[in-house]
Image (cartoon, rainbow, N blue to C red):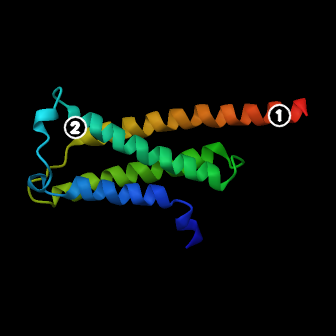
Amino acid sequence: MKYFFSYIWAIVWGIIMLTLLLLPPNELPDVRKYELFAGIDKVVHMGIFFVLAILLYWESAMKSKWKGNMWIIVSKVVISTVIFALFTEEAQKHVSSRTADLYDIYADCIGIGMATFSFLLLYRGNKAKKNEEIYTN
């Protein structure tokens, strides 16, 4: 149980994502007036999966106190978020008035990739900062 509590924000965000992605569109507020360009839904997909992956990366790094193996963390987060993306699209097939879209999965993976790139930069920057503190002290 303690394991799940260390990822509480990612779990909460995942539940919010599932709710929004699986609700029939007629139960959501009409946001068509806010559509700035065609394909804005793909940007939304990138954004929500970026946030999910960042939360998982952050909580993993905090749990390991930035001492865990970076590549194991990246592997776990990428695999779990891609599986979650595939699951949400498959689930949308079975919800009336929702459709599964291969481009949504691409957008999800781009968001995951952006989060992974950000994590790699932060992780290396944090490691360099810690090494610098060791050598100056």
Marking on residue 49: none
Q: On the rendered structure, is 37 left or right of 46?
A: left
Which residue is drawn at the image coordinates 21% and 32% (left, top)?
Answer: 40
Query: Which residue is at a point 28% across and 39% down the rendered structure image?
Result: 44
x then y, percent, for residue 124: 67, 33
**Residue most toward the bottom?**
1
Q: Residue at x 37, y 39 (%)?
A: 109
- Above or below residue 8? Residue 85 is above
In the drawing, what numbered circle is on residue 133? 1
Report helix, strand or loop for mark 2: helix
Q: Nearer the viewer, residue 33 or 100?
A: 33
What is the crowding at mark 1: few (fewer than 14 residues within 10 Å), some, or many (at least 20)? few
In percent of the image, x 28 and y 54: which residue is there? Answer: 88
Q: Dot 2: few (<14), some (14–19), or many (≥20) neighbours within 10 Å?
A: few
Q: Nearer the viewer, mark 2 or mark 1?
A: 1
Q: Is residue 39 left or right of residue 10?
A: left
Q: Pinpoint residue 59: horizontal percent, then vertical percent.
A: 56, 52
- Viewport quadrant of the N terminus: bottom right
Percent coordinates x, y for residue 119 in the rendering:
56, 37
Residue 98 percent coordinates (x, y):
13, 52
Amino acid at the residue labelled 1: Glu
Task: Say which mark, if any, is on residue 41.
Answer: 2
* Residue 90 can be seen in this image: no
How much space separates mark 2 and mark 1, taking CA atoms? Answer: 44 Å
Q: Is residue 59 visible?
A: yes
Which comes before the other along the chain, label 2 or label 1? 2
| Callout 1 secondary element | helix
Q: Is residue 76 left or right of residue 89?
A: right
| Contact flag, marks 2 and 1 (Cβ < 8 Å) | no
